[in-house]
Image (cartoon, grey):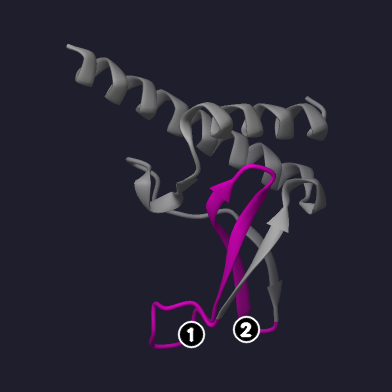
C-alpha cells in the first residue's frame, strides 16, 4: 500500500473517531519508535489529523516522563512507521465502534 494511501486512511479514522493516544488502546503496550539519537528515543504516542506527537525519552534514565516532545507529520515518517500507526488507528476505530455499539444498546 502506498504511504499516501495509508496516511489518508489514518486521517479518515481520526476525522471520524477523534484523535487518540497509545494509552487509550487496549492490549497495546508499546509505541512506534520514530528515531534514536545517542541515548535518546523518540516514540509516537499521540495521534492527530496529519501528525503525531513524538515524546523523547532517555531509556536509561530514572524518570518515565519525556525529556522533550515535538510534532511530526505522517508524510515525514518512514513507511514502516506509517504502517504501524495505521494498524493502531484501525484498533482505535474498532474499539470506538464497539463502544458506540455498547452505548446504543
Kind of element beneath mark 2: loop
Q: Identify the residue position indicated by label 2 in the image.
A: 39
User: Which quadrant holds residue 15?
Assistant: top right
Kind of element beneath mark 1: loop
Whole-percent x, y for residue 70 in the image? 65, 69
**Cα gap from disc 1 to disc 2, whole angstroms:** 8 Å
Whole-percent x, y for residue 16 in the image? 52, 26
Which residue is at 53% across, 35% downward? 89
Q: Could you tell me which quadrant the N terminus lies in? A: top right
Q: Relative to 47, does residue 53 appear above or below in the rendering?
A: below
Q: Relative to 49, does residue 92 appear above or below in the rendering?
A: above
Marks counted in the figure total 2
Q: Identify the residue position indicated by label 1 in the image.
A: 60
Residue sitting farthest toward the top: 105
Magenta span of residues: 38-67
Q: Is residue 48 magenta?
A: yes
Q: Is residue 15 magenta?
A: no
Amino acid at each position: 500500500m502506498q504511504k499516501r494511501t495509508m496516511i489518508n486512511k489514518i486521517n479518515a479514522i481520526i476525522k471520524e473517531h477523534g484523535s487518540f493516544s497509545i494509552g487509550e488502546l487496549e492490549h497495546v503496550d508499546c509505541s512506534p519508535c520514530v528515531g534514536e539519537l545517542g541515548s535518546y528515543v523518540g516514540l509516537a504516542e499521540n495521534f492527530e489529523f496529519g501528525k503525531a506527537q513524538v515524546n523523547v525519552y532517555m531509556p536509561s534514565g530514572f524518570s518515565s516522563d519525556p525529556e522533550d516532545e515535538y510534532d511530526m507529520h505522517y508524510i515525514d515518517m518512514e513507511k514502516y512507521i506509517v504502517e504501524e500507526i495505521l494498524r493502531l488507528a484501525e484498533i482505535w476505530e474498532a474499539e470506538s465502534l464497539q463502544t458506540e455499539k455498547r452505548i446504543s444498546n
